[in-house]
Image (cartoon, rainbow, N blue to C red):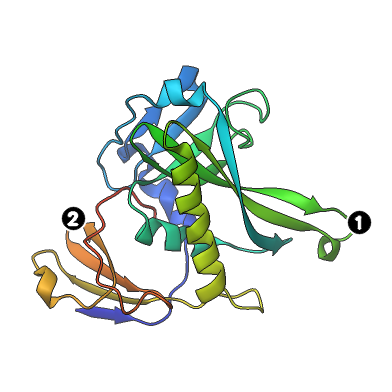
Amino acid sequence: MLYAREFIHCGFLRAQDEHARPVVDLPDGELKLRCEDGTPATTEGLEEALRGPRYQVATDGTMEAGFYFGSLQLYAATTLPGFVRLSAHRDKGTGATQIAKDGDAPAILGDASLAYLVHVQTRHGDSPAEKEWEWVVHGFGQHGAQRAEQLAATVRAWDHAVRKNDGKQNDPVLTVYPVGTADRELPAGDVLHKPYCRLVFQWPGRNGLRPASVEHCDEAL
């Protein structure tokens, strides 16, 4: 068993095996869904959903210029079923989403529905200290409103229990077990399955939980 109390988020590592990860194109190549665990995402009905109405949910969570929200993405990836990455390949405003071209966003999908997280600027100014952005969730599909609320609730939970006022975050306790370790031998926490190990994340505010094992696409590590 390996045990970590603090660690560094290394987002650049994703590029090392980018071509080995399943990527699903959505309408006319405008969007791509990326799944990090090697299992292609189920996207049946999503193209039709993206042609329908868009639901928007405010999270009331804000960030300042230069704020790094890798902790929020990790929190979503390790606590939400159906987690994927959604990237855009068309200029913002010309397609279904509000994601900037060549940008990507944390997202969840299920039941031919999709919700994703973006940030919009709510305060402008001449200096970085005067600027501010708010996290907003958009949802599509029959269950898009519910998916959006689910993702927004996750942002609020992270903002309340994990984020610190000084711009830093409370890291979860992370333990790593061999792949064959039985559920009963794992501590309470959010479980991610990897080819050679099982990861257990114990986030502030969630340490007392023993949820069902999370099996989904993620960008956790």
Q: Is residue 165 above or below residue 94?
A: below
Q: Position of residue 75 (x, y in %)?
A: 44, 63
Decide which of 11, 220 is in the foreground and name it. Answer: 220
- Residue 16 appears in the figure: yes
Q: Position of residue 41 (x, y in %)?
A: 31, 36
Q: How many neighbours does mark 2 have within 10 angstroms: few (below 14), some (14-19), or many (20 or more)?
A: few
> Which numbered disc, 1 or 2, marks the residue closer to the eye?
1
Identified by mark 2, the residue type is Pro
Decide which of 164, 50 is in the foreground and name it. Answer: 50
Q: Is residue 167 above or below residue 68?
A: below
Q: Secondary structure at mark 2?
A: loop
Looking at marks 1 and 2 on the same chain, the residue that comes earlier in the sequence is marked by 1
Q: Are marks 1 and 2 in contact (CB under 8 Å)?
A: no
| Rendered image quadrant of residue 56 | top right
Q: How many neighbours does mark 1 have within 10 angstroms: few (below 14), some (14-19), or many (20 or more)?
A: few
Q: Is residue 130 left or right of residue 204?
A: right
Label 2 sits on residue: 195
| Rendered image quadrant of residue 100 | top right
Q: Which mark is residue 18?
A: none
Residue ID at (51%, 62%): 72
Residue ID at (32%, 40%): 21
Residue ID at (82%, 61%): 128
Label 1 sits on residue: 126
Q: Position of residue 159 (x, y in %)?
A: 56, 68
Q: Is residue 214 left or right of residue 202?
A: left
Q: Secondary structure at mark 1?
A: loop
Disc 1/disc 2 C-alpha distance (Å): 48 Å
Q: Position of residue 161 (x, y in %)?
A: 51, 75
Identified by mark 1, the residue type is Asp
- Residue 221 appears in the figure: no
